[in-house]
Image (cartoon, helix red, strand yellow):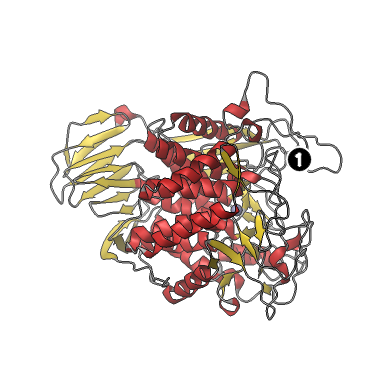
Amino acid sequence: MNISDVKYSGQFYEAEVPNTFDIAERAALGIQGIAGSIDPDRGHTMWFYIRYDVKKPYMLHTSSDISNAWKLLDDISMMRQICGSDEHLELEKKYRAHALGNIKDGLIWDIYDEKDPRPWRSHHNDNVPGNLRYGEDFAISGAGPRAMQTMQTWQQIDRSPVWDRYAEEIMDGFLRIALTKDDYIYLPPDGGYGHPFSYPASGWISTREPLNVNESSEGNILGMLGFPLLGCAMWNRFTGDPKALDIARRSYNFIKQTRFWGKTIDPNPPPGILPNLAPRLPDPVGIAGGEMGHWNHHLHAHARSLRGILEYGMASGDLNAVEFVKRAYEYSWSLGIPRVGWINCFPGGSNMMEGCAMGGLIALAIKLSETGVGDYWDDVDSIVRNILAESQYTREDIMQEMSDNMIRPHVVHGTGFDREPGPGQKCDVNVLKRTKGSILSLVFPDHVASPWIMHCCTGNGLQGFYYAWEGAVRENGDSAQVNLLFNRASKGLDVDSWLPYQGKVVIKNKSMKNIAVRIPGWTDKKQVKQFVNNRPVDFMYAGNYICFTGLSPRDEIKLELSVPIMTNRYTVSARTKYEKTYTVTTRGSTVVDISPRRTGEGIYPMFLRDEMKTAVDPGMKKIRRYVPDKTVTLW
Ligand SMILES: [Zn+2]
C-alpha cells in the first residue's frame, strides 16, 4: 500500500467578529501543542507524558506513545478542518508515515529495535509485570480499531480509497486475535504485558476472559474493549460494511453484560487497597444500576464503551442499546456539576475530571441529541465553554510562575512512568512554550493540582472541541440548523456571538433558505426577540428552535435574548472524604466565578474570568475565517 498524504482544502476570508469564545483559536493552539510533543529524533513518536509540576518541566516517552498516536493524528486533521492552519504539515506527514509503518498484517505493533531498545515500551505501571519478554514485538490490540476512526476522518477529507483498504486489513487483524465464546468476542486482560491488552508476537500468554470491570493494567477493561465496538460500529455507519457491524455486535454482546456495570465504590476500602481495586458495594436500594449503565470508576473508559454502544444502536436500529446509553449518560451528571461541565471521574477515590472524559461526554451528548431521545446541547455548551476551555493549557505565564516555585526535579510516586526518567526517555527543552495548547489531564472544578498531561487527554479533549464545532452548525441542502451560539464560520452562514457579554447573536446568511436556531435552556424563551435585516419578524418555534424560512443570501438574522446571572451551590463527592461544596456563578452558560478556590504551591488556577462578570462590550476583532471544502461530519 502507498502511504497517502491527506489533502486539505478550504476557503479563507477576512471578517470582523466579536472578541468572544472561538473554537478556531483553540484549534490552532491545539496543533501547536501536539507538534511540540512529537520527538523527531525517535522516528516521530510523541512524548506521551508531560510534567509541569517540577522545577524544570519535562516530557517523557512511555509505553503509551505508539498506541495514542492515532488520537493525535485524528486531532491534527480535525483542528485543521476548524482553523485551516497549515503549520507543521511536514511534521504531520512524517508522524503519519511512522504510525502507518507500525501496521503489519492488520495489527499495530510496538516493534523492538536492538539499537534503540526503549526500556519503557513494555512497562505500563507497577501493578503489572513488565519486561517479561523484553525483546519481543507486541501488538496494541485497541489501537487498530482506534486507527479506523482516524482513517474515517481522513477518508472524509480526501476521499482516498487507501483508508478503506487499511480499515479492512485492520478488521481482519483484529478478528485473528480476538477470542470467541458463545455470541461474543473479547480480549484477555492478562494476555500480554506492559500496555493493557497487548498481544505478544508469540501469542496470548493467557486467554482468560475478564470477570470484573476493574481488571487489566489500566484498571478498567471497558476503555480498551470499547475500541473495537466504537471503531467498527462507526465504520459500519460510515460505509455499511457488514463485517464491521458483526464485530460491533459481538463486542456489544460482551460489553453490555450487567456484571460490568452498576454497583458503587467503597469510600472506606480495606487498609492498603485503593478504592478502584477494592470490592464494590451493591447499588443503592431501589436501583438496578447494571441495567442502566451506571458506573463507579474511570468515567472515560465507560464513556468509550457507551459511545460504542450508542453507535451500535444507531447502526443496527437496536433501541435498547440507545436507551441504555441515555440512562447512563443522565446518571453521570448526578456525579458532577452540569453548569461547569465537570463530572468526578473517580468517585470515592478523588475529586477530578479527566480531559479524556470531556471529549467522550460531548460526543455522547451530541449523538444522543441526534437520535432524538433527548436534547443535550446545553450540556455541550457548558463543557466546551467551561471545563474543557479551562483545561486547555493556555497560560504560559501562570505555568512558568508555578513551576519556578517548585523545588523537586522530577516526580516519583508509585506508578512506573513516574520514576526517575531513564536515558533517552526525557526531554526538558522549552517544554512550557512548545506544549501550550495541550489538554491538562486531571482537573478539579476550580483548579488543576500538580498540572501534568497524559496525551490521551489532549487526544480526546481536542476531539471534544471538534465535535462541538461540527455540531454547532449543520447544513442539509438549503436548510441549516444552528445548535450552539458561539462564533462559527460555515459554508452556508456565519455566526457572530456576543455571548455572554450581551444576549446578541447575528447570523449572516450566505446561501440558506431556511435556518433553525436553537434557543438555550437558560434564557426565557418568551422574551426572545428576532429580526431579519433589522426588522422584527414573526417566528415559529419548533421545540427549542426558532425557524426562519424564505431567506435570501446576505440576509442577516439577529437574536436578542436575556442572559441571566445565576449563582448556585453544588456539593460533590457527597459522603466521602472528598466532599466539597462549590458556589458557582454563571452568565448564560459561561462560568464567571467559582469558590472556594484552592491556591498555593503547584496550583494552576482556572476560571480567571473577572472581566466577564460585568463587562457588556467584548470588543471586535479582525480575523481570517476558514471554511473547509469537505467537513468531517461522521465522527
Ligand atoms: Zn486521558
Q: Residue furthest top?
A: 286
In terms of depth relative to the viewer, which is nearer, 252 or 171? 171
Q: Label 1, secondary structure: give it.
A: loop
The amino acid marked with disc number 1 is: Pro
Residue 452 location, x and y as percent?
Answer: 65, 59
Q: Residue 375: x percent and y percent?
A: 40, 33
Residue 430 placement, left or right of 506: right
Q: Residue at x 57, y 69 (%)?
A: 37
Question: Could you classify mark 1 by the number of other residues whose Cα lies within 10 Å: few (under 14), some (14-19), or many (20 or more)?
Answer: many
Vertical position of residue 201 compared to residue 360: above or below: below
Q: Tell me, yes or no, if residue 613 can be seen here.
A: no
510 vs 18, nearest the viewer? 510
Residue 220 location (% of width, % of height):
67, 45
The answer to which quarter of the image holds residue 64 is: bottom right
Q: Is residue 156 visible?
A: yes
Q: In percent of the image, x 46 and y 33: which residue is there?
A: 322
Query: Is residue 202 found left or right of 494 in the rendered image?
Result: right
In percent of the image, x 82 and y 42: which residue is there?
Answer: 273
- Furthest toward the right, the residue is 271
Image quarter where the N terminus lies is bottom left
Residue 357, x across and y down, in percent: 56, 46
Left or right of 512, for residue 605: right
Against 19, residue 34 (above or below) is below
Q: How many marks?
A: 1
Q: Is mark 1 within 8 Å of ligand 1?
A: no
Residue 273 vertical position relative to residue 202 in the rendered view, above or below: above
Q: Nearest the camera: 503 or 137?
A: 137
Q: Which residue is mark 1?
A: 275
The answer to whether 336 is drawn above or below residue 426 in the figure is above
- Which quadrant would residue 419 be assigned to in this image? bottom right
